[in-house]
Amino acid sequence: MSETKTLTPKDFKSDQEVRWCAGCGDHAVLSSVHRAMAELGYAKENYVVISGIGCSSRFPYYMNTYAFHSIHGRAAPIASGVKTANPELSVWVVTGDGDSMAIGGNHFIHVLRRNIDLNIILLNNQIYGLTKGQYSPTSKLGQITKTSPYGTIEPPFHPCELVIGAQGKFFARSIDNNVKLTTEILLEAEKHKGTSLVEVLQNCVIYNDKTFGYLTDREHKKDRQIVLRHGEPMIFGKDMDKGIVLDGLKLKVVKLGEDGLTEKDVLVHDAFEPNPIIHLLLGNMNYPNFPIALGVIRSVKADTYEVNLDKQIAEVKAASPIKTINDLLLSGNIWKV
């Protein structure tokens, strides 16, 4: 892949007017993507951004790269074809919670299972924004929306559970207003070889405003978020005096200094652990009993689909008696005319 060290985030901005609502969290995510691509140092022609349908799926118009605005729920298979045809490309899928986990749910789980080297950014605002406020697969139980005026009666999907259930190897989570953290995570996602799923908790100011307000509130956010980094203890809080420990088969929040607890008693994050149990527990932590886990939660090495495909092609070619077009034309049952 060709590289250049002279590009800036501005080089990745297209000439199109950004038409998301003022205050939409997508603006911040777009800025993070521009920053990450500039920092990665690839030439613009090495990037491809592919989307489905939804507010988030307007992303390709705002990227000065190769891009494709596809159809509802179908970004993953199109991106899979692009990456398989040209593994040298850096391929990015931008999708929403409805686009990916409702109509696109089948493609979502299978691209994770296949471990194609794609970066998927899932903008999760827990609502259908483009179609004006219907509940989505991630809407909270009991949430009142245009299509659930008395509250939803369906339990929501948790992206982390779907990723791990589909044998996914990389899962990370950020929040739209933390551009620095999102950029950091996107860089790690691109470095990971295989399907990376980055969930961004994103605010829809029109149809689901402040759905993550409890996380972004300045007074409380440090007590309600924990940024996980590989090799570092799971400590959080305004005074950095809270920690996560394993209590039997469950996680537990403790306060350092109480009952003789110290930093040594706190879990140390291991994003590279192949066993997904702890990653699942961390990804499912929820307020008010736990902080919400942000950062790279799971990053496990495994052969990618493209590597295995190339290996299989090489093995079949080596074992085949057919080496040239003449070998093919003169093989099997033939006759002369």
Image (cartoon, rainbow, N blue to C red):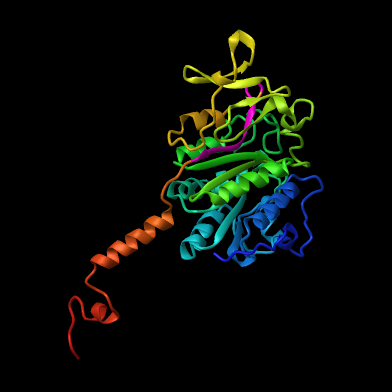
The answer to whether one can see residue 99 in this image is no
Compare residues 4 and 299 and report the one nearer the observer. 4
- Tell me where residue 61 appears, x and y as whole percent: 70, 61
**Horizontal side, residue 272 vs residue 233: left or right:** left
State left or right for residue 72 relative to residue 279. Answer: right
Task: Give percent across and percent down for residue 15.
Answer: 77, 65
Task: Say which of 228 and 304 sits in front.
Answer: 228
Q: Does the magenta segment cover residue 291?
A: yes
x, y percent for residue 253 = 60, 19
Q: Dividing the image into 4 quarters, which one contains the N terminus? A: bottom right
Quadrant of the image containing the C terminus: bottom left
- Residue 147 versus residue 150 in the image, above or below: below
- Give the image location of residue 270, x and y in percent: 51, 33
Relative to 179, residue 317 above or below: below
In the rendered structure, which segment of residues is drawn in magenta?
A: 288-299
Q: Find the residue positioned furthest to the bottom.
A: 337
Vertical arrangement, residue 204 with respect to residue 326, above or below: above
Overall secondary structure of the magenta stretch?
Answer: strand
Write down the quadrant of residue 123 in the picture.
Answer: top right
Residue 1 seen by the camera: yes
Q: Residue at x 60, y 29 (%)?
A: 153
Q: Pick whichever, 305 or 40, lies toward us.
A: 40
